[in-house]
Amino acid sequence: MIKTTEHAPSLSYRVKEKFRTVFAESDPLIVRSPGRVNLIGEHTDYNHGFVLPAAINKAIYMAVSRRSDDELHLVSLDLDRQYVGSAKRVVPSSLHWPDYILGVVQQIQALGHELGGFNCVFGGDIPLGAGMSSSAALECATAFAINQLFGLGLDPMTMVKLAQRAENVFVGVQCGIMDQFASMFGRRNHVIRLDCQSLEYAYVPFDTAGIRIVLLDTNVKHSLVSSEYNTRRQQCEAGVKLIQAHHPEVKTLRDANMDMLKAYVASVDALVNQRCEYVVEEIARLLAATKDLERGDIASFGEKMFETHEGLSRKYAVSCPELDFLVDQVKDDPSVIGARMMGGGFGGCTINLVKEEAIDGLVERLTPVYRKAMKKDLKVYIGQIENGTSLGE
Ligand code: GLA
């Protein structure tokens, strides 16, 4: 059976109810901040390439109100835990989950804004560790909520950047800008082509009739912190350094090409070369894939998704047996236009473009084979493209 998403208003209602119970206040500010999918362009953001994400119908809801003192009272509805700290001295907690909020508080303060204390309850239906960027959604919700609450006048891109810095500095993941950008800037029924170098972006309609975005969750929890994410980033930087010795104008892999890799990286470090090759190919692939979308050639777009998976699995080595299995299973299925692992990797979901009428059959077919082969349950989400971070009800 296909799992549908939890009904959003009930989530917002539960967050408000919890707020009422814990803080005895009934009129908090409500912010909704979504998770994201990414159609193509993986591990390209921190290499200043392009990405093609969209915000989805899975979100964090946050209720906030100002306090008269400097205390920060943070409540996780889903974990049923509370954290109390001070806006005057923001330090990483030992609990992990408050750090996404505290990191944003710290980054806003670093921009020179004085913040008083606030009460906060949040909860959501973005599956944790499934590669749909629940952490970015929490960071964006926090930035948006604080901006409103204290009337700071921050523009959305500033909020995106500080949310990313919070993750880099406070949480310790050297992530790129894609997740926070998609969560903040999402637009219903559109994917966003973001140039991660210039930060220029364009909304591309995604109204492929009869085709749905299906997320197949391996149930393998990825952890970017403990994963090799930061190592991949270093390997890309190492490749750039080798090229720079001959081409000082090359600042990131966005500026590099396959000839440069061949000439200056391949003979020095085969592994670094392999990683860089994937990135250079993926940046070009995304540009071609965007043209496919504009032409309405979804079949060609889908083929490129399979190519991306191949690259992520073999050259970039961020896949895992479960992700490979799921992509392999749909490769020759004519109802699946394209499929690949999505996000940082090492677990989480595959993103599939599937003909609507075939979804039920596909899920029925995959569920038992996945359980048999991988000894895990398959979870399925139908991704609807929604608006980005906004005030909720
Ligand atoms: C994670 C990071 C993003 C991006 C993807 C891979 O989601 O947070 O910045 O690098 O992995 O494309």
Image (cartoon, grey):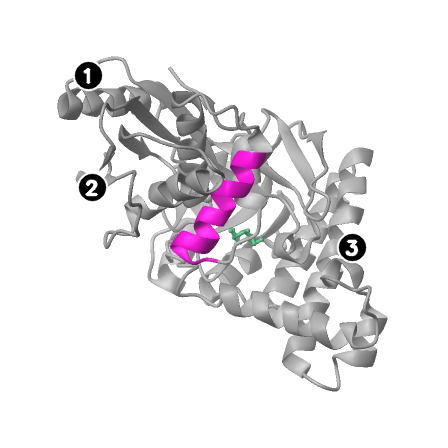
Label 3 vs 2, first from the N-terminus: 2
Vertically, is 17 above or below 299?
A: above
Label 1 vs 2, first from the N-terminus: 1
Check residue 284 in the rendering and tell me which mark sits there, or answer none.
3
> Residue 101 lies in what quarter of the image?
top left
Q: Please state if 205 lies on the left or on the right of 63 as rendered.
A: right
What is the x, y in percent for residue 60? 38, 32
Residue drawn at x 42%, y 49% is 130
Label 1 vs 3, first from the N-terminus: 1
> Residue 63 lies in what quarter of the image?
top left
Query: Which quarter of the figure is the N terminus placed in?
Result: top left
Residue at which label 2 appears: 83
Nearer the observer, 338 or 393: 393
Do the residues under discs 3 and 2 have CB atoms within 8 angstroms? no
Q: Which residues are magenta?
A: 158-173
Vertically, is 125 above or below 7?
A: below
Q: Residues within 10 Å of mark 2 (few under 14, many from 20)?
A: some
Nearer the observer, 32 or 380: 32
Q: Main secondary structure of the magenta part?
A: helix
